[in-house]
Amino acid sequence: MKKWYLFFITVCFTMLLNTASASVKEAPQEFSEESKQCIKCHKKNNPGIVQQWGASKHYRAKVGCYECHAADQGDKDGYMHGKKNEETLISIIVSPKDCSNCHEKEVRQTDESHHAKAGRIMASLDNLLAEVVEGNSAMVTEGFPEGNSAIAVTGCWQCHGSEVKVNEDGALDPATWPNTGIGRINPDGSKGACSACHSRHEFSVAQAREPLTCGKCHMGPDHPQREIYEESKHGIQYAANKHKMNMDNPKWVPGEDYFTGPTCSTCHMGATRNQEVNHNVGLRISWNNRPPLSVRPEITDKKMGSPSANIGWEARRDSMKDVCSTCHTEDYVDSFYIQYDGIIDLYTEKFAKPSIALMKVAKPLLKPAKFSNKIDWIFFELWHHEGRRMRMGASMMAPDITHWHGTYEVAKHFYNKFIPELKKIAKDAEAKNPDQAIALYAEIDKVLNSENHKWYLNKMTDKQKKIRKSAVEDAKKMYSK
């Protein structure tokens, strides 16, 4: 019995020695022999990588290439790498699962966030556009023998992530790699890419705090957070005072380590006097403004099966208010949220609900293929572009984007494109589908005769006329002094 036990222990120990596992739980005392071999070779062939790593905290902690890139026997993307007779089992991808060996809390928080679920966009209208309407299936790789859309690969997937496929020879399929999409699905089953924000191989905290890092994905007509931030007072303060921000400070608390304009990281993730750093970027957001109708974030979290569904929007707003309180008084912050909620209510009641109702009535008269109807494009941009800009601009205090790129565009397209196109659809259907046409005419009439839209029919109420007249007169008196 004793001999069998010794044999069992010996076998287990041997297996541990022969298993390349990225399982560093604490900083080594010195660089491993495997990492030394990596450095020796890559210093000659890829000096930039070695220099980046040399400037990192990993270098100072003796965490080398092997400690992060080591693979286990049986890993899909594991392969033998190195000089002959000096080969080591590694993987190219360092996944959140690998990072969690040392950064367990940060990975868990990220895994519970919207970022880790970003790949779900692949089932949305956005990807129908990229895969079919804008693209085709001409990009053929081993992982996609039936073809794929090049714009989905180089556009959607680079921000939202894709499933990284491993080919028969162990190589990563070029349609899915390189890819640092924040919701990337890795060969080991983990979701996300820490390197989306903490770029390899320096993993600079200062870079992760830089607004441009977030702006890689959060920009453009449908979610212009970068442009909104740059227009806002916060962005102006940051640009003017970046040199005072102590961006590379390990402790980075507003009001203590810096006192100028905040960055994206400050508000959505950073430590405060009362909160620790949190990589769940949705825990301070009180509205989700991505859908056609704004919803509370816990509703979205519940749909995604995230544990964050247990945290209500009121608690999240209080967490954000805690950040605001570093520089702003309680009354100031409360008044801001009244303004912000007012824009959400305006968008919802005046444009979102009526347009959704109208599209529902019009649907039987439309061609079945999405985006094969002119009205599909008008409605999509109404909520997906202009409607988001209207709401997101208000959320970050960017008046020009809220108004001229937001509410103005929403109103212009609603009255000059959306309503006229619906009327045309109804008219074209009069002969073949008279009942459906009548129903659509009735819904249009109902919307335009509502309090929010009566002006369009020159039916502004006496009360509205009085308010408008008073506003004009008051303005003239005020600014003529």
Image (cartoon, rainbow, N blue to C red):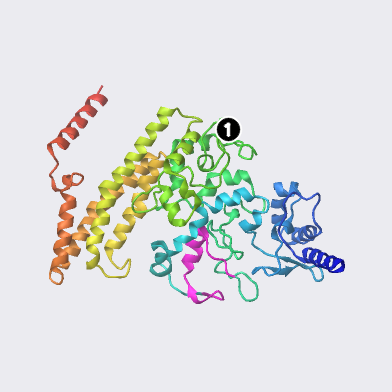
- For label 1, the residue is 258
Is residue 208 within the magenta segment? no
Q: Nearer the viewer, residue 438 or 298?
A: 298
Quick check: 361 above or below 394?
below
Quarter residue 80 falls in: bottom right
Q: Is residue 222 above or below residue 438?
A: above
**Is residue 412 rendered to the left or right of residue 59?**
left
Q: Which residue is most to the top?
A: 481
Q: Please, is residue 303 above or below residue 209 in the view?
A: below
Figure quadrant of residue 475: top left
Horizontal arrangement in the rendering, residue 315 relative to residue 455 (left or right)? right
Q: Quick check: is 163 in the magenta stretch?
A: yes
Of all residues shown, which one is farthest toward the bottom? 145
Q: Residue at x 54, y 58 (%)?
A: 181
Q: Is residue 88 left or right of residue 322?
A: right
Tell how many labels.
Answer: 1
Helix, strand or loop at mark 1: loop
For the magenta stretch, what is the residue range?
Answer: 140-165
- Quadrant of the snapshot with the C terminus: top left
Instruction: Determine the residue located farthest toward the front in the rendered image.
Output: 1
Horizontal and vertical percent for residue 222? 40, 53
- Residue 52 in percent (x, y) is at 69, 51
- Given residues 386 and 285, the one toward you in this image is 285
Q: Quadrant of the N terminus?
A: bottom right
Look at 18% across and 44% down and name the residue there: 451
Residue 42 in picture, x, y percent from top left: 74, 60
Q: Residue 155 or 316: which is nearer the viewer?
A: 316
Q: Tag 1: Cα neighbours inside 10 Å, few (<14), some, or many (≥20)?
A: some
| Position of residue 13 in the picture relative to residue 175 (left or right) | right
Amino acid of disc 1? Tyr
- Who's the residue at 21% across and 60% down the image? 422
Image x and y of residue 267, in percent: 50, 40
